Image: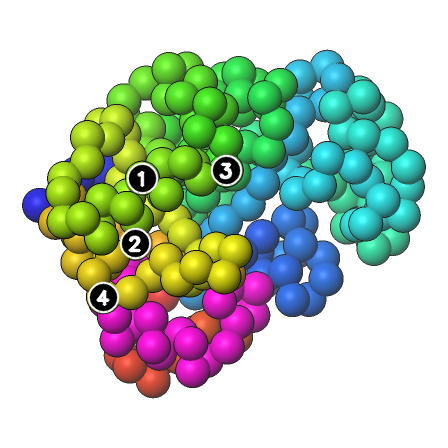
Amino acid sequence: MLRDFAYLDAPTPLAFAHRGGAARGDENTVEAFARAVALGYRYVETDVHATADGVPVVFHDATLTRMTGARGRIAQLRWADLRSIRVGGAAAIPRLDDILAAWPQIRFNVDVKADDAVDPTVATIERCGAGERVLLASFSDARLARLRRAAGPKVATSLGLRGVARLRLASLAGRRLALPPSVVAAQVPVRYRGVRVVDRRFVDHVHRLGLQVHVWTIDDPAEMHELLDLGVDGIMTDHVDVLRAAYLSRGHWPTDR
């Protein structure tokens, strides 16, 4: 039986706009999220770092260079200095609390990218009353353990790299695996370092543990259909139009969106 969390209260398969739909180039911006929501997305994947004065901001990289052309690390800048910097010369870097407030109906998959962002992120989620519509994620198992301690068992989480590796080995051996009570999904790539992760055996095993399988980052329509045939519960994509078309073709895009 699937774990009962409000975060997963929508029919599967879930469609996730990865960084709001990164293919357009303005990832993790208000504009990107607005486009995804306008298309009907109700799940958005995003990333969080914290400024030097403890403000959680929605941004993937630790440094500003790739997205803004500016120099500097987010962790070394105060919010007052960061707020004037633009992504692609146009879009501002958003604060997490502003994003949560702007779309109270949206589920956010929040990848916490740095240890110093753990406490500010959890405090912001609590202050915004957003615990039921947020899933906390990280590649780092140690950081996820800190997030779970800070947020408590009622805020949904996924698994880090070591947790996913243990889950994959458990699926091959056909044995159960004890997991923290807040874990609701295995969020995984199709392959990791050339090794296949997502196959029928893995999906069925994860389902028997009461978890969902969310796969990232899938942009090819043929691969989307292959994964849906395997029974995955969600797909994350940079190409939000492509995933929407694939879901529509299979009757997975709810008519009330």
Few, some or many C-alpha atoms within 10 Å of disc 4 (few <14, some 14-19, many ≥20)? Answer: some
Image quadrant of residue 238? bottom right
**Residue linked to disc 4:** 200
4 vs 1, front mark: 1
The residue lying at 21 percent from left, 61 percent from top is: 201
The residue lying at 41 percent from left, 15 percent from top is: 150
Query: What is the distance, in whole Å, between disc 2 and disc 1 at their CAs?
Result: 15 Å
| Disc 3 element | loop
**Residue linked to disc 1:** 166
Closer to the N terminus: mark 2 or mark 4?
4
Q: Which mark is residue 139?
A: 3
The residue lying at 50 percent from left, 49 percent from top is: 45
- Bounds of the magenta span? 218-240
Query: What is the distance, in whole Å, between disc 4 and disc 1 at their CAs?
Result: 17 Å
Q: Is residue 121 above or below residue 102?
A: above
Which amino acid, mark 2? Val
Q: Is residue 58 above or below residue 196?
A: above
Query: What is the distance, in whole Å, between disc 4 and disc 3 at their CAs?
Result: 23 Å
Q: Answer left or right for 252 relative to 44.
A: left
Q: Which mark is residue 213?
A: 2
